[in-house]
């Protein structure tokens, strides 16, 4: 039997904090001063060493040291530092393009996003902020992060997504290639959704709140909302990153309760909610191959699912192409090397 899976903790994207900080004096036997300097210029905007180190602090695990101790150089590899700087450069490029399009993020935009996220997670706004605080994320940091996400979404909508059309022919080809031709192994092709209450990945509230979350999302799936998108947004199991796709599962890999749940289901249908170890799960059956015969979910039952998959892939491709073109036309100068230190006598 395949063990119950749990989803890794979702990481909140790195934030950009722009403010002037005087040189930081680090405590120790020999006191060290980190010299602030420019590490990159993006058109007419600069990124300082202080900003870069603050970004590194956001992704390093807590050390129990004070801020100055955590900013001390040497806690991160040059490769990761380079990626962080690239992320900072891309964020500035996006902001510069947004100004050209007269796109901006308002306080109301951020408030509405927080309200929506709170409702989707079955929490009040104060409860959400408390949970973020326990994870080391202040409200100001979270609002800045949301502002970046919203601005990126506006850019994508303005420049990219409105120009994408997924034809029925393309969707049918994907259905043939993925849902039919590739079905060779005997078993059930399953999409999974799960909500857990025990262990390090569990949300607060215990089993009762997990039940509420499961029932809310189960209802959304039964109403016809895209199962894969729901799994990406809400599922608390590792399969969420793949839209809940578990691939082909044989009956030998299923628990007895799961076998009983799925044995009479037709492809394209959504199961009831069952308890699996310390989680509540439900499933969508995409296809069934038993006794040499394969039954598939009808195209109409998975068309929205396929359109969503193809649309997301096309948006990502075009966005990356767009950002590459912006980088090519921008004037970017970098001077990244190991942060400078000097010893105070």
Image: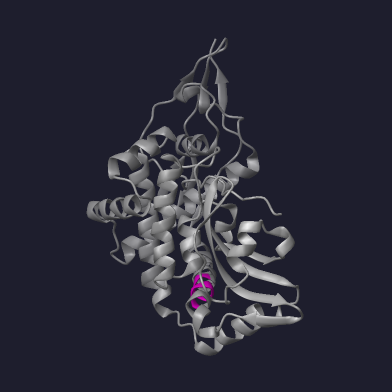
| 246 or 279, nearer to the observer | 279
The percent coordinates of residue 110 (x first, y second) are 29, 52
Q: Is residue 331 left or right of residue 254?
A: left
Callout count: 0
Q: Nearer the viewer, residue 29 or 211?
A: 211
Q: Which residues are magenta?
A: 307-312
Q: Name the quadrant of the C terminus.
A: top right
- x, y (%) of residue 187? 71, 70
58 relative to 95, above or below: above
Q: Is residue 26 above or below residue 305?
A: above
The picture places residue 79, in percent across and down from the top left corner, at: 64, 44
Against 65, is 339 above or below? below
| Identity of the residue furthest to the bottom in this view | 169
Q: Quadrant of the N terminus?
A: bottom right
Q: Based on the displayed image, in which of its 4 quarters is residue 261 positioned?
A: bottom right
**Residue 28 left/right relative to 42:** right
Q: Residue at x 46, y 56 (%)?
A: 234
Is residue 127 rendered magenta in the image? no
Regarding residue 268, the answer to whether it shows in the image is: yes
Residue 298 or residue 269, whichever sits in front: 269
Q: Quick check: 56 left or right of 1?
A: left
């Amino acid at each position: 039997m395949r063990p119950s899976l749990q989803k890794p903790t979702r990481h909140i994207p790195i934030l950009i904090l722009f403010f002037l900080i005087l040189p930081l004096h680090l405590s120790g036997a020999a006191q060290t001063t980190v010299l602030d300097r420019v590490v990159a210029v993006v058109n007419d905007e600069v990124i300082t060493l202080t900003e870069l180190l603050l970004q590194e602090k956001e992704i390093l695990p807590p050390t129990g040291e004070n801020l100055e101790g955590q900013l001390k150089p040497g806690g991160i590899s040059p490769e990761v530092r380079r990626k962080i700087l690239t992320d900072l450069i891309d964020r500035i490029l996006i902001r510069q393009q947004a100004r050209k399009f007269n796109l901006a993020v308002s306080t109301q935009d951020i408030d509405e996003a927080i309200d929506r996220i709170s409702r989707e997670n079955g929490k009040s706004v104060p409860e959400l902020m408390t949970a973020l605080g326990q994870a080391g994320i202040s409200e100001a940091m979270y609002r800045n992060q949301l502002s970046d996400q919203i601005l990126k979404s506006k850019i994508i909508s303005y420049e990219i997504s409105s120009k994408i059309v997924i034809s029925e022919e393309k969707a049918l080809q994907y259905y043939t290639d993925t849902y039919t031709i590739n079905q060779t192994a005997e078993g059930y092709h399953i999409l999974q959704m799960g909500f857990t209450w025990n262990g390090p990945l569990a949300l607060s509230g215990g089993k009762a709140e997990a039940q509420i979350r499961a029932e809310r999302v189960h209802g959304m799936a039964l109403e016809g909302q895209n199962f894969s998108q729901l799994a990406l947004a809400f599922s608390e199991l590792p399969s969420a990153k793949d839209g809940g796709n578990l691939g082909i599962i044989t009956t030998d890999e299923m628990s007895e309760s799961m076998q009983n749940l799925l044995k009479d289901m037709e492809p394209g249908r959504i199961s009831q909610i069952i308890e699996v170890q310390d989680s509540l799960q439900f499933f969508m059956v995409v296809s069934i191959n038993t006794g040499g015969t394969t039954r598939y979910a009808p195209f109409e039952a998975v068309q929205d699912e396929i359109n969503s998959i193809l649309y997301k892939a096309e948006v990502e491709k075009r966005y990356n192409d767009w950002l590459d073109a912006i980088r090519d036309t921008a004037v970017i100068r970098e001077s990244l090397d190991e942060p400078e230190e000097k010893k105070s006598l």
